[in-house]
Amino acid sequence: MKKTVPWYHSIITKLTLAFIVLILVIAGMSVVYTFGETKSALKETTRDELTAIASVIATQIDGDLLQTIAPGDEESEKFVTIRDQLYAIQNANSEILYVYTMRMKGDDVAFIIDAENGITEDAAGIDEVYDNPTAEMREGFETPITEHEFTTDEWGTVISGYAPILDSTGSVIGIVGVDMSSDRVIQRQDFIGNTIYIILLIGIIIAGLIIGFFSMTMKHDIDSLNETAERISMGDMGVLVTVERKDEIGELAQSFSRMVSSLKIMMMDPEEK
């Protein structure tokens, strides 16, 4: 009687599991590397974007007018003109969280005009000193630049870009700062990560279906050969081998066919031969 091999001992099961594990290992390593590189590239793209935005805004600000702003000018026409200009720029781009201008006061960095000064209660005032300015913020007085990492202050966690503001003589009188929320950057990274995971999942499903299809065809043909061998062992010489493949299983099927033919000849009477 034909003995049934438990599914967990089946060579098809072992091959299928081996292929699935191999795919998962390769896919996992690919995701870790790809996602890491994509996050880095996205962050660099965001930094370049903020640097470009800050540079453009800096060219639109009247440096001669800005440098005349002093504490107490909050209601003046020149203050309101620049404040409204910055506020319009801030609201025109959903990616931007805050826009503001700053200048050096001795060794300190202080605000000149915050786009929300007079609009929201927590806006920075004129000549309000910014605590713990970063190296990139100070470098922004010389060249357009964006922070390499997120910074956290009383207004939240952001990544900031800076660009110098020039007066009519070409002298630097301050900087414009542009903030993007860390949540926005993380959303971008999550979108890329989720896209990679979805593509990976679809790839694994397709690969699993392909592996399953070929495994089932192999199992069907191997079962057919086993049945043929079982019938031969029971003395049935009229059996036909119907497996046709162009691989090792096909070669095995041809060997079975030759074996059946040889057995038939050996079992013939001398007169029949």
Image (cartoon, helix red, strand yellow):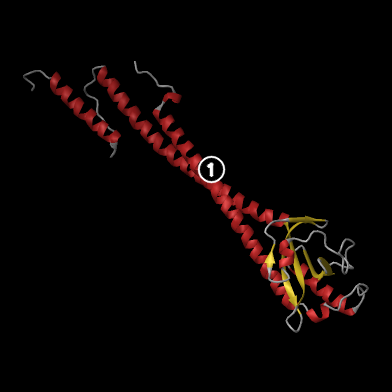
- Name the image quarter holding residue 267: top left
The picture places residue 231, in percent across and down from the top left corner, at 28, 21
Give the residue type at disc 1: Gly
Tell me the element at label 1: helix
35 shown above or below 72: above
The picture places residue 100, in percent across and down from the top left corner, at 80, 68
Query: Quick one: which residue is furthest to the front in this view?
Result: 106
The picture places residue 194, in percent across and down from the top left corner, at 61, 49
Seen at 92% across and 75% down, the residue is 75
Give the residue number, with chain letter if any, for mark 1: 28
Q: Nearer the viewer, residue 254 or 22?
A: 22
Name the quarter where the N terminus is drawn.
Answer: top left
Name the quarter where the C terminus is drawn.
Answer: top left
Seen at 20% across and 25% down, the residue is 260
Residue 160: tell me if it is visible: no
Q: Nearer the viewer, residue 174 or 30?
A: 174
